[in-house]
Each structure stands twice: as structure tokens, then as C-alpha cells.
Amino acid sequence: MRRAPYDGVVLTAPVSVPYVRYTNETAHWWIARALREALKIIDMTPPELDGLSVSSFTLAPDTPVGLTQHLGLSPRWLDTVPMGGACGVAAMRRAARAVQAGDVDVVACVAGDTNRIDSFRNLLSAFSRFSMDATFPYGFGGPNASFALLQDAYMAEFGTPREAFGQIAVAQRANALKNPQALMKKPLTLDDYMNARMISDPIGLFDCVMPCAGAEAFVMMREDMAVAKGLPFARIRSTIERTNAFPDDPIQLRGGWAVDVDELWEMAGHGPEDIDLLQTYDDYPVICMMQFEDLGFCAKGEGAAFVARHDLTIGGDFPHNTSGGQLSVGQAGAAGGYLGLVEAIRQVTGTAGPTQVPDARWAAISGFGVINYDRGLCSAAAVIEGAGT
């Protein structure tokens, strides 16, 4: 079913608060910094903001309601999106419809997390609890082990060599070297990737993201407001979202994008071949490869061949995760679910600076969250188009 377009609503004011490896600040502090920068761009004060969407793993035991009190906000529309790597696109979808319905004029969508030792331990403990049903019988716990099982099954099913995943990681590091905010500053070669120590076979060191602290934000508003303020903006051309796709799969080798991919491109009015850049959720390269396939850029099982015949760097024929992605920028908790979308907004509005893809107009973004070995609960994707002012 073709859904109603997102006419009259735009994305603007992309913000990235520089990530740090260690911090003593709370999630509140990081979210507040991102919100302050977004409001500065759109020239609004906190009391004037009438919509807020928040994603955070480490804000708890506080809540977005409590956050409005801390930050002096009085929104008439409030949302929280606990969907991990899918939270950016999901927050955008909900906020866009709220603006379109007239429930709110401006929504600041913010994601941020701390990696203070107390908060991070609680986060890992929670992951082990909610993944226990699938991974505990194997004696495993935590994301590295779950993704190791997933990647091992993928490699066995499709005959994919580890080098193919390494090509993704190496290209993203090359992109990150152009991003002054990326935490990873050292060039990465395929030999470095292949010879790195094993973390959870077949997951090696450079398959894993570095946990860090940081925040990302963007703003949804009516298009006429963005024009009046002289803001560069992007339009939403298409979105999809799916939870608990393929529940009968014994092993999750495809995500929810595969269910709705035809709708994604039909609504956009374009196909994968028209996209100028792709931002995938990338806590591990195997998930990037699954997204190449499930989003229709290549057939299932052909991800390795697709990677081999394309240049995934900023200046290549298939720019992918142009900021460096989480694999080289860092994973700031829920902000990782925003990273690709925020970068895509910059790209299609020509404001990406040193990571800019020449003449970028169309971008696809996909997210994936709440992983388990036998199911991936949250998946989302979007196509956006740069529109200028």
C-alpha cells in the first residue's frame, strides 16, 4: 500500500556533539548540549520549542518527562523511541507525522548517551538479560557474541570470506580520516583488519564499535518555517519500519527491510540505482552487508561481490557511511541510531564539509536495533532529498 507523502515537513539543523572515549558527564548533559546547538541553529529558545523526541539508553532511571523539567521545556508533544539502531528513522517518522497533523510546529529529535562506568555496566547487564532466551543456552552474552553467531551463520550460508567484511571497515576508516570528529584517527588496511586479535570468532577487533559518549540531533518543522528562517533542509521522500520480521527464521540472515523494500522505493519514486549515498547502521560490518542486500542494492547472498566491485569511500562510486560510521567514529549509545541520518541531512544539504560527497542530492538511510541471534526486532529505512532554502 502506497502511504501518504510527507509533504510540508522538512528535516533541518543536523547536530553532532563531538564524541569522547571517556566522560564523567551524565546522559542529560550530552542531550542538553545537542538540544542547545539545534535551538541555536533554528533561532529558538527552550520555552518556544513545542515538540521533543528523545532516545537514550543511559538516561534511566530518569525519563524524557523529567528531562523537560531539567531543561526548562514545556512541549505540547513528547516522544521517546527506545529502538536502538532504528531510533533515528523511527523518531523522524513519528515527528514528521505530528508536524503534518498540526499537533506541533517544531520537534527537536535528540539522542545521546554517556559511557560513565556505572551507566555502561547497567547497559551491558540489561543487554545480557533481554538476549538471554536466545544466547544463554550457548553460554554467550553481550553483542559481540550474538553478532559472532550471526556472522558465522551468514558466512556458512553464503560462502562469504572475512575479507569482504574487512573491505567495509577499511573504507569507513578512510572516510573517518576526513571527519575531524571521528575517534579513530589511524589508517586501517585490510591486513590490519585480518591480523587483528579475535574477539568472538569470527568477530575480530575491527568488526567492533568503540563505546563512547556523545549526542546527535536534528529538527523537524514545517517547510514554510524553514524557508522563512533561511535554513537548508531536506525533504522526506519515503520511509519504512518493521518490528520482529521473519519470526520463524531459525537464524536472522535478513532484516525487516526485506519485507517492505518495494514500498520504500515505490514511495520514493526512485530506485537504488538513483541514490547518491547510503548510510547504514553499522555496529558490525555483517549488518551493513545485510542492508546492502535487503534494501535492494544487490541480491541476497551477493553482498561480498557487491562490495568487491564498488568503492565505498566518499570519492567512490558508492559512498557509504561517509562520516566513518560507528565503526570509526564511535558508538555513543542511542546516538548511533541517529549518526547516519544526521550525516545524510548534511550531505544532501551540502553542509557536510570535509566528508561531502560532490553533488549529493538523494540519500538512503537504514537502521537496525535490539539485535538477537535469532531475530532482529527493529528495522527502519528512509530516502531523503536535499531541497535547499
Image (cartoon, rainbow, N blue to C red):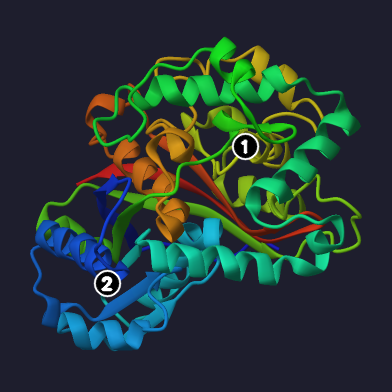
Left or right of 373? Residue 75 is left
Q: Gap in Å between the C-alphas at discs 2 and 1?
A: 30 Å
- Residue 195, image x and y in percent? 62, 16
Q: Position of residue 294 (x, y in %)?
A: 72, 42
The kind of residue tagged 1 is: Cys
Q: Position of residue 139 (x, y in %)?
A: 81, 56
Q: Which residue is mark 1?
A: 288
Closer to the N terminus: mark 2 or mark 1?
Answer: 2
Instruction: Report whether 226 appears left or right of 130.
Output: left
In what quadrant of the picture does the N terminus appear? Answer: bottom right
Q: Quadrant of residue 217?
A: bottom left
The secondary element bearing badge 1 is classed as helix
Identify the element where label 2 is drawn.
helix
Above or below for 121 versus 299: below
The amino acid at mark 2 is His
Look at 8% across and 64% down and name the residue there.
43
Near mark 1 (Cα within 10 A), the count class, few <14, some 14-19 or many ≥20, is many
Tell me: residue 331, above or below residue 221.
Answer: above
Q: Nearer the viewer, residue 151 or 23?
A: 23
Structural crowding at the residue carrying mark 2, measured as other residues with C-alpha within 10 Å and reported as few (<14), some (14–19) or many (≥20): many
- Residue at image coords 40%, 56%: 335
Task: Pinpoint residue 14: horizontal percent, then vertical percent.
Answer: 27, 51
Disc sitting over residue 80 in the figure: none
Q: Is residue 338 visible?
A: yes
Which label lies toward us, 2 or 1? 2
Q: Residue at x 36, y 27 (%)?
A: 176
Residue 7 appears left or right of 76 = right
For image coordinates 29% across by 29% down, the residue present is 179
Query: What is the quadrant of residue 295 in the picture?
Result: top right
Is residue 306 visible in the rendered structure shown here? no
Mark number displayed over residue 28:
2
